[in-house]
Image (cartoon, grey):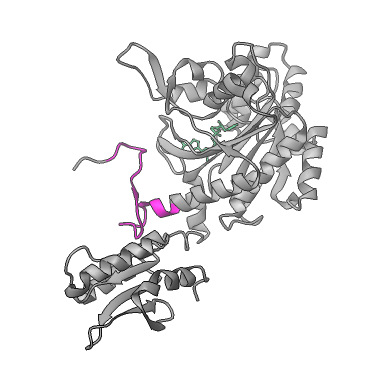
Amino acid sequence: MIQPLPGFRDFYPEPVPSPDAWSCDLRQHIFETWRTTSRRYGFREYDGPPLESLELYTLKSGEEIVQQLFNFTDKGGREVAMRPEMTPTLARMVAAAERHYRKPIKWFAIPQLFRYEKQQRGRLREHFQFNADIFGESSPGADAELIALLIDSLRGLGLTADDFVIRVSSRRAWQAFLEARCADPSRAYDFYQAVDKLEREKPEVIDEKLRLVGSSLQEVREFIQASQPTSEIQTLLDELGARGLGSFVRVDYGVIRGLAYYTGIVFEAFDRKGKFRALAGGGRYDQLVHLVSGGKVNLPALGFGMGDVVLAELLKDRGLVRGATQSLSAYVLIEEESLRAESLRCVQSLREAGVSADFPLAATKSDKQFKRAVELAARVTVKLERAPDGAISARVREMTSRSEQVIPPDLVAAHCLGLIHRPPG
Ligand code: HAM
């Protein structure tokens, strides 16, 4: 049988066929939480093309991501790439249309992204990434707003300050550190890359790379140890504190970010136990719009990306995937085939009233119908019955409480609507 390509996923509806299979219900639950939290913060949804010109990424994303591109020459001879991240697309879109929108622009998207990475835990060759970005505001109040959204989108999934932490750092502080030791600005990206890999590569290798820019592993470690907040970071901490979100953040100069375009405050979200790779990462990139627009537009910008892969692993680890399954509201049992027409009318009235409803498509044994209702996690079953005098009534049964009510068929939709708007119990 043909298998999916390495690093690409199949998403199954619940119940998934094996414990390591990816759940489409869980994915939907995550997306809905991202969307509702973004809207609560006043962010608008946008989207862009999954295939872009290669040049968009070679411009400023940095070597690491360029090495991971799924790129090819299309039939028209264009050099193209599947998008490995959303930020360059967004910078292009904003540069082209910013005059049409009031500032600050607050936008979000949930693109599927593609990176030819070595497949490992928490890293695949495709993932969905929640992106939230703000354009046109250079005060650290915008950084605080963005990090608050990141925190609340994780809290919306049931995670708490005991589960995750946002490590906040500053590219500006690191740049000052570098400039005091190395006069060559073209070395900055290599330096950021070396610091970014501090926790993942051998100390000797890192030390050698740092010596090339006039520093050393020890100096870098001391700088991280001190993690002296810049005034921008202090404002950010104060604003998050005022929102009651101070316990979710920590100043940590061990974070620097691997991508080349960041310019100011940068941050990454991690699980508290340090078991998984980064849940999310982002920061300021005040020069990217200028660069992507060929110098025509200048707008300060900041944003973050949160992937679904590490997040799903963490939710599973914390037992927070329960309740993610989408359940059906009503299953209409047809035990009496002579009542199929009336039952179909009942199904239709439920669906028209906005109640999700299903039923057996062909004559089926009653125990199989009931098992199907259980498998679909139906809140109620509805069964039409004919009395000896020919009158038809509907028996509505709540699956958890097993309580039953017999009502006229034309009241079924209103009755079920009332039941599903009541919390289950
Ligand atoms: P990034 O750090 O490359 O940032 O990715 C952000 C998050 O996406 C990571 O923390 C991780 O959860 C997830 N992720 C990245 N690559 C993979 C992968 N191969 N498999 C699974 N998950 C992955 C960016 O992409 C920036 N463009 C974010 C941003 C938006 N900065 C400003 N605005």
Is residue 359 something one can see in this rendering? Answer: no
Farthest bottom residue in view: 388
* Percent x, y of residue 115: 43, 30
Check if residue 8 falls in the magenta segment: yes
Nearest the viewer among 26 and 405 is: 405
Left or right: residue 404 versus residue 311 is left
Residue 116, by quadrant, is top left
Instruction: Considering the whole magenta stretch, tell me its main secondary structure.
Output: loop
* Percent x, y of residue 57: 50, 20
* Percent x, y of residue 232: 79, 33
Position of the N terminus by quadrant = top left
Q: At x 44% / y 17%, what residue is drawn?
A: 53
Is residue 79 something one can see in this rendering? Answer: yes
Q: How many marks?
A: 0
Residue 5 higher or lower than 178, as above or below: below
Which region is colored magenta? 4-26
Q: At x 48% / y 44%, what residue is drawn?
A: 308
Nearest the viewer among 396 and 26 is: 396
Nearest the viewer among 277 and 234 is: 234
* Percent x, y of residue 417: 46, 68
Residue 344, by quadrant, is bottom left
Left or right: residue 33 versus residue 390 is right
Q: At x 50% / y 46%, what residue is drawn?
A: 310
Check if residue 89 falls in the magenta segment: no
Residue 309 higher or lower than 408, as above or below: above
Q: At x 23% / y 72%, what residue is drawn?
A: 334
Left or right: residue 187 versus residue 77 is right
